[in-house]
Image (tube, helix red, strand yellow):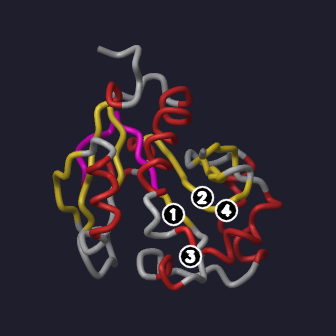
Amino acid sequence: MFTFRPLADADLGAVVSWRREPHVLAWFPDRLEDIDHARRRYGRRLSGDDPVRMWIAELGGVPVGYLQSFVVASDDDLTVRCQDPEAVAFDYLIGDPDLVDKGLGTEMIERFCRDVLVPEYPDAPRFLAAPDARNHRSIRVLSKCGFVTGLWIQPEGAPWADVVCTAQRATFDPTVE
């Protein structure tokens, strides 16, 4: 069973390690060189001075991946591209290569949306992720979780388009009809 907690400075070594894995580099090509580089890159997030919140995913109490979440309106570029400023966006990865292709992504995303996004963002009507359009594994997992593919957006400097995948809050929040 997945649980989630805010990412802490002590987790940066694991994040650096995960970001070096080939299955992660395929979709997150900007490597973290070391813990100091990660600390500089994520320092504002760790201190709470950035709208992006970072989370560690634990499986049976063991850190296995991380996620980040933010209100779309906090990112001007994404707001224009995805045309849904009220939504909450999230990115995710399972860092441990031995856990990839084991069906865990579906559980991780469902639980993250239900256990983290629903309570942390009570006003968000929708949740969205925008994986690289070539990342069929991620798009398939999102679909299994109730996300619907929509706009293809071209992030500045990216070699390929991303696909905006959106799910209504009610998919994960039993209090919403």
Under mark 4, the amino acid is Tyr
Q: Mark 4 or mark 1, which is nearer the start of the sequence?
A: 4
From the top left corner, tell me how far across and down residue 114 is, in percent.
48, 33
Residue wearing tag 3: 97
Q: Are marks 2 and 4 in contact (CB under 8 Å)?
A: no
The amino acid on which the numbered mark 1 sits, given as a three-letter code, is: Leu
Between residues 126 and 159, which one lies in front from this camera angle?
126
The residue sitting at 67% across, 62% down in the picture is 42
Write the residue at 32% across / 39% down. 85
The part of the image, by quadrant, that contains residue 172 is top left
Real-space CA distance between mark 3 and mark 1, rounded to the nearest whole angstrom: 10 Å
Depth check: give the residue in front, 1 or 67.
1
Front disc: 2 or 4? 2
* Residue 111 falls within the magenta-colored stretch: no
Residue that carries the numbered disc 2 in the rendered image: 66
The correct choice, above or below, for 48 with respect to 156 in the image is above
Tag shown at residue 93: 1
Q: Nearer the viewer, mark 2 or mark 3?
A: 3
